[in-house]
Image (cartoon, rainbow, N blue to C red):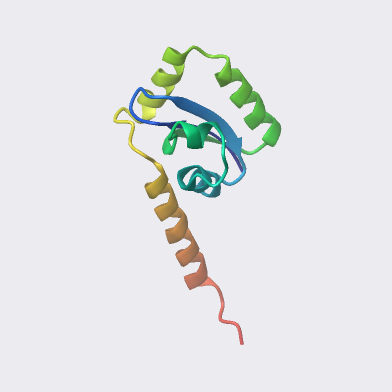
Amino acid sequence: MYYVYLLASARNGTLYLGVTNDLIRRVYEHKAKALPGFTARYGLERLVWFEVHDDVEAAILREKDIKKWRRAWKIRLIEESNPDWRDLYDSLAACAIAALRMSSDSAPAVR
């Protein structure tokens, strides 16, 4: 799976659009400021929107398309699914942890 995502510094703040194949890892890197650059410089660590794609080319095309959009359109995209601009990272990470636990609980015991 591939993800197109938007980070924000705050509600109606600076926006960053990206694409990745590991959303939890990539947002964690932004939050930890693991790599120098735009997101670290402007404090972009709030995941406010994302969508999932099966195909990397489709994800990249979608990212390029959204990059051409006016800022108001990006804000509308965020607010359609996240009107309070909540950081979606914690709930996303919690779901991933729960899924891992469920899969390990149902895995056969190794002898």
Residue 78, above or below 92: above
Residue 59, above or below 92: above
Relative horizontal placement of residue 40, taking residue 55 as reference (left or right): left
Quadrant for the N terminus in the image = top right
Residue 76 screen position, x and y as percent = 39, 18
Picture residue at 42% right of the left edge, 13% below the top: 72
Picture residue at 57% right of the left edge, 43% below the top: 35
Picture residue at 46% right of the left edge, 66% below the top: 101
**Residue placed most toward the observer, 30 or 104:** 30
**Residue placed most toward the observer, 22 or 51:** 22
Figure disc tally: 0
Relative horizontal placement of residue 87, taking residue 3 as reference (left or right): left
Residue extending farthest left: 84
Quadrant for the C terminus in the image = bottom right
- Determine which quarter of the picture holds residue 75: top left
Residue 93, above or below 73: below
Relative horizontal placement of residue 105, taking residue 55 as reference (left or right): left
Residue extending farthest bottom: 111
- Determine which quarter of the picture holds residue 71: top left
Picture residue at 60% right of the left edge, 34% below the top: 19
Residue 54 screen position, x and y as percent = 63, 39
- Determine which quarter of the picture holds residue 79: top left
Residue 109 screen position, x and y as percent = 56, 81
